[in-house]
């Protein structure tokens, strides 16, 4: 029987089936070099601060697209690629994806950071896009082919009251979604635990806005989910994002109270700094746990997966380093019975969404993916943007990632730092102190 170390080593070896179809499709073609790395930064809508990379090769007309999405540090990411990493990539062999991933990973010496990871991910996605285009295959074919027909998504329902939540969940069920994340109440993301502005006991001349109270959250949110279950039964698979607002002790109690509701998962019940408490949660309750939206380092996700302390890993593909790293995490998950639920928050972009999609189609450890519906003008900007129909995500089936970019249109919407991005995660308690997301 293999021990844990041997299992991990076996899971992460590059599979033979990824290389053979590509070799057959490209036999006789000349060697490739990266000729240019172009950064395309654009804000087609106020809350989009998107940075894309276009890797242009020595083969005429052959290029790849990648996402370097960090909506809160987009100018820093743009500069990092233009001034540091882009020049380093020029002249390299784009076919050596794993080697160039590792080379880039140690290029800046300090690694696993929020800027270096997304820059590395952009290159990684672009190289996989190039490989698929050169072989004239959708990327999922080079990754071993489909193990599912389409990618199921979960929708986002919310409401100020339990009754409104029930109505919004029902609306998504009627659209074909089977998985729905439910958030309640105003005052900040997550809801359900906020004292209205100006109410309650507050310091003189202190914070007057909606204030988070975890005891109130502990009482209101489980009751809302009980009402959803009473009205809609067991046909809907329910999800909820705590957004790391709870202290460890009340996180344990919240997980216990959610067990009778039979959640599909409860997300980010703890901040990353307190992930050791997942051992106590696992010992206390069977409520499924999802974690990882803020993760950037293997030391964060590896113990939670290998010790089976979570049920879903919630990383964003570009935040962890791209397709290459996502496939390794998915292989690790398969060995330990954990499933993927890549994070696709509202400020994310269609290129990253498709990178996650191609991984999802090919991995046995897939669980669910977050939905992200883009308006028609984004489909015009990025032809090939995936479509959502009946609760499923469908790519274009074009070669590579199956998406392109209209650079002229992107240029009409120069990059803007939407300063609201700096505050949407800000939650404060009654005394005015910050509550960590």
Image (spheres, grey):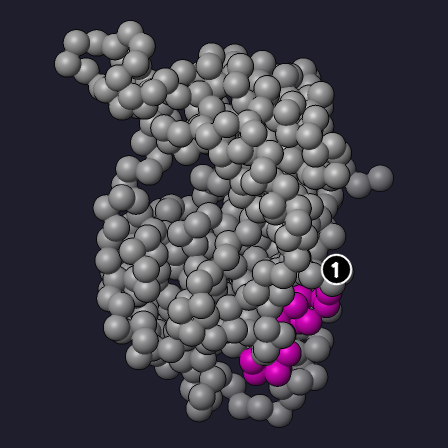
Viewer-nearest residue: 280 or 16: 280
Decide whether residue 137 is among the magenta residues: yes
Whether residue 288 appears in magenta in the rendering, the answer is no
| Quadrant hosting residue 142 | bottom right
Question: Furthest-right residue in view?
Answer: 1
Where residue 424 sits: x, y (%)?
Answer: 33, 38
Q: Which residues are magenta?
A: 132-146
Q: Residues within 10 Å of mark 1 (few under 14, many from 20)?
A: few
Picture coordinates of residue 186, whole percent (x, y)? 40, 29
Q: Secondary structure at mark 1?
A: loop
- Residue 76 lies in quadrant: bottom left
Q: How many marks?
A: 1
Q: Name the residue nearer the viewer: 349 or 73.
A: 349
Q: What residue is rendered at 50% in x and 54% in y?
A: 372
Q: Position of residue 67 (x, y in %)?
A: 42, 62
- Residue at the location (32% across, 60% down)? 45
Residue at coordinates 62% horizontally, 92% vertically from top-left? Answer: 28
Left or right: 377 in relation to 238? left
- 307 is higher (above) or lower (below) than 255: below
Question: Can you identify the residue that label 1 sits on?
Answer: 148
Image: 92 above or below 323: below
Residue 119 shows up from this direction = no
Residue 341 is situated, as x and y percent measured from the top left of the image, at 60, 45
């Amino acid at each position: 029987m293999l021990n844990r170390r041997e299992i991990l080593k076996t899971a992460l070896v590059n599979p033979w089936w990824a290389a053979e179809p590509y070799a057959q499709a490209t036999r006789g073609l000349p060697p490739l070099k990266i000729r240019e790395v172009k950064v395309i930064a654009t804000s087609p809508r106020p809350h989009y601060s998107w940075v894309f990379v276009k890797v242009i090769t020595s083969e005429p007309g052959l290029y790849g697209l990648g996402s370097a999405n960090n909506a809160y540090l987009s100018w820093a990411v743009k500069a990092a690629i233009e001034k540091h990493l882009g020049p380093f990539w020029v002249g390299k062999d784009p076919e050596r994806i794993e080697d160039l991933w590792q080379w880039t990973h140690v290029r800046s010496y300090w690694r696993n950071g929020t800027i270096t990871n997304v820059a590395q991910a952009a290159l990684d996605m672009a190289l996989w896009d190039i490989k698929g285009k050169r072989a004239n295959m959708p990327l999922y074919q080079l990754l071993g082919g489909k193990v599912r027909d389409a990618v199921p998504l979960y929708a986002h329902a919310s409401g100020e009251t339990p009754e409104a939540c029930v109505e919004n969940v029902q609306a998504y069920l009627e659209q074909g979604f089977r998985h729905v994340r439910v958030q309640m109440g105003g005052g900040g993301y997550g809801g359900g635990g906020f004292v209205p502005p100006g109410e309650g006991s507050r310091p003189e001349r202190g914070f007057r806005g909606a204030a988070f109270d975890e005891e109130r959250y502990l009482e209101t949110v489980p009751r809302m989910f009980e009402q959803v279950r009473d009205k809609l039964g067991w046909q809907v698979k329910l999800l909820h994002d705590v957004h790391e607002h709870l202290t460890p002790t009340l996180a344990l109690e919240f997980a216990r109270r959610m067990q009778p509701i039979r959640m599909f998962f409860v997300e980010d019940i703890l901040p990353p700094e307190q992930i050791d408490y997942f051992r106590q949660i696992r010992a206390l309750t069977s409520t499924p746990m999802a974690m990882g939206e803020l993760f950037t380092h293997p030391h964060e996700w590896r113990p939670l997966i290998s010790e089976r302390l979570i049920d879903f890993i919630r990383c964003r593909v570009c935040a962890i380093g791209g397709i290459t790293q996502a496939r390794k995490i998915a292989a690790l998950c398969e060995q330990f019975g954990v499933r993927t639920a890549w994070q696709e928050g509202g400020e994310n972009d269609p290129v990253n969404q498709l990178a996650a999609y191609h991984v999802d189609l090919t991995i046995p450890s897939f669980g669910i993916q977050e939905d992200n519906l883009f308006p028609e003008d984004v489909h015009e900007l990025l032809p090939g943007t995936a479509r959502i129909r009946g609760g499923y995500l469908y790519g274009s089936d074009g070669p590579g990632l199956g998406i392109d970019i209209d650079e002229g249109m992107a240029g009409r919407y120069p990059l803007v730092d939407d300063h609201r991005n700096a505050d949407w995660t800000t939650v404060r308690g009654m005394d005015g102190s910050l509550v960590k997301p």
